[in-house]
Every structure is written in C-alpha cells, then in structure tokens.
Image (spheres, grey):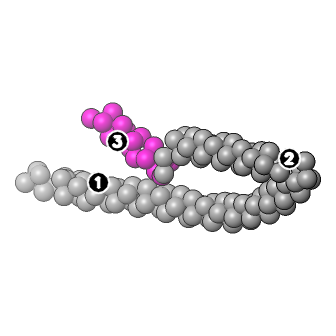
Amino acid sequence: MADSDEPRRPGGLGPALSELAANAIALVRTRLELASVELQETTGHVKQLLVLAIAGALLAIFTLLFASVFVIVCFWDSHPLAAVGGVTLFYLALSVAVLVRLRQQIRDRPAPFSASLTELQNDVAGFRHKR
C-alpha cells in the first residue's frame, strides 16, 4: 500500500520512445528544410549564371566575328591565306583554353547539398558520441 501513497513519476519507456521519435522527426524536418533552401539558392544562382553566360557568349561571338573580318580585310591584298590561317589558329587557341577551363570548373565544383551532408554527418557523430 505504500506504493499507492507515493506519487507516480511520469515517464517510462513508452513516453521516452515517443519523445525520441518526435525529436528524430524534427531533426529530419530541419535537415530537409536546409536542403530545400540550398536547392532554391542553387537554382537561382544557376539561372543567373546561365543568363550572364548566354549574354556574354553572344557579345563575344559578335566581337570575334567583326575582329576576324577586320583582320582578314586588312591583310587581304598582301597575305590573304596568312590572315585566314592566323584567325583560325587564334580561334583554335581560344577553344582549347575554354575547354581546359571548363574541365577544371567541372572537376573543382563543390558537392551539391554540402551543407546538408555536413549537418547530417555532425548528427551521426553526435549520436555516436552520446552512446
């Protein structure tokens, strides 16, 4: 009967598991929100880069076209083949430089969702540390 006189402490395995599940769900929700924000930022950044790249490429094409015509016309009377060959070699060198830079950019880009992955790794390390 002494047991019935003592106030019962709330708790037990059931409520503890419910609390653990709620915390785990909240943790997953937070990480998904972070991933969503990163995806939105990346999408906006890619769109902006694409617009700038297209505008820059079009302007560069027109510039190179008129510069090429100018060089060829200037040397047409004296060295027409050398003028055309020089312009062609110039474009070849530019193409190689751009392709090398593109390859470097692709190789050195950061992993997508790097902040989300880092947070998940921190969570796993935190859970392992608390054991």
Residue 70 point in image, percent of width and height: 89, 57
Residue 123 is one of the magenta-drawn residues: yes
Secondary structure mostly seen in magenta is helix
> Going 48% across and 52% down the picture, which residue do you hit?
113
Could you tell me residue 37's position as x and y percent?
54, 61
Q: Nearer the viewer, residue 110 or 128?
A: 110
Location of the C terminus (image quadrant): top left
Q: Above or below — where is 112 with respect to 61?
A: above
Disc 2 vs disc 1: which is toward the camera? 2
How far is disc 3 from disc 2 in space, using C-alphas?
A: 70 Å
- Which quadrant holds residue 28? bottom left
Of marks 2 and 1, which one's residue comes earlier in the chain?
A: 1
Foreground: 17 or 102?
Answer: 102
Would you call the spot at circle 3 few (<14 residues within 10 Å), some (14-19), or many (20 or more)?
Answer: few
Q: Residue extending furthest left?
A: 1
Residue linked to disc 1: 20
Name the residue rendered at 61%, 61% in the picture.
Answer: 46
Q: Is residue 39 visible?
A: yes
Q: Which residue is mark 3?
A: 124
The label nearer to you, 3 versus 2, is: 2
Would you name the residue on which mark 2 appears? 79
Q: Earlier in the sequence, mark 3 or mark 2?
A: 2
Q: Which residues are magenta?
A: 113-131
